[in-house]
Image: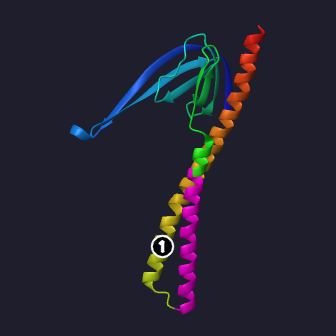
Amino acid sequence: MELLRGPAAQVMAANRVTGSGSGSSMSVSTEFITTFAIGDRQVRIKGDVPPVVNAGDEMVVAGEQDRSGVVDAICYVNVTRGTGVAEEGPWLWRLGAIVFLIFAGLMTLLMVLFLGLSLLTGRMGSDDAVLICLFAGCALPPYFAGRWMMRRGQRVSRALKLIREASVQASAGRKSR
């Protein structure tokens, strides 16, 4: 997780419109993408609404660097204009993770119970093995989805904490000038 502060430079805005379906079931979505530099670092903000960033605006950005070295913003605050955007609260990600992990746990418990009953009765056949594989296949995807959602919630939580602390410091610094 990185925190960048400073004036925005080399601001470029674009949008990506995608559509699917046809006729009355056509779905169109627009993603707004703004890239700019803070110091020697490139920053990219993507979202459903156009980010408010102009050249010279004092920005505070929390995000993660991608493979190309660009920092993908999770949340940002434009201190100059008093605007900012943050992803949904981390509690939504964590709640989703808990639901998926509980489902995966229940499927695992069912698998263990079924396996235990099959072993106790001494009737472990090929149909039982197929059923155990089915239970395992139903438990693993929600488990991994839950883990991913929990990690995303932790990243969003860290980004929000960083951005709150930095934006408070930046606005306090602007008021003292």
* Residue furthest to the bottom: 122
Could you tell me which secondary element the residue under label 1 belongs to? helix
Residue 170 position in % (x across, y down): 72, 18
Write the residue at 57% across / 24% down: 43
Evaluate whether residue 22 shows in this view. no
Whether residue 104 is in magenta: the answer is yes
- Residue 171: x percent and y percent? 71, 17
Q: Callout 1: few (<14), some (14-19), or many (20+) C-alpha neighbours within 10 Å?
A: few
Callout count = 1
Q: Is residue 103 magenta?
A: yes
Is 177 or 115 nearer to us in this picture?
Answer: 177
Left or right of residue 6, residue 121 in this image: left
Which is more toward the observer, 69 or 129? Answer: 129
- The answer to whether any part of residue 19 appears in the image is yes
Q: Position of residue 146 (x, y in %)?
A: 57, 54
- Looking at the picture, the colour scheme in use is rainbow
36 w.r.t. 74: above or below: above
The residue sitting at 49% across, 17% down in the picture is 12
Residue 22 horizontal/vertical position (percent): 23, 39
Q: Principal SS element in the magenta part?
A: helix
Can you tell which quarter of the image residue 79 is in?
A: top right
Dot 1 amino acid type: Cys
Quarter of the image with the N terminus in it: top right
Q: Which residue is mark 1?
A: 133
Find the magenta span and give its range. 96-122
Q: Is residue 59 left or right of residue 53?
A: right
Q: Is residue 99 above or below residue 85?
A: below
Q: Could you say which quadrant of the image residue 99 lies in?
A: bottom right
Which residue is drawn at the image coordinates 45% and 76% (left, top)?
131
Residue 119's place in the image compared with 165, above or below, is below
Position of the C terminus, as image quadrant, is top right
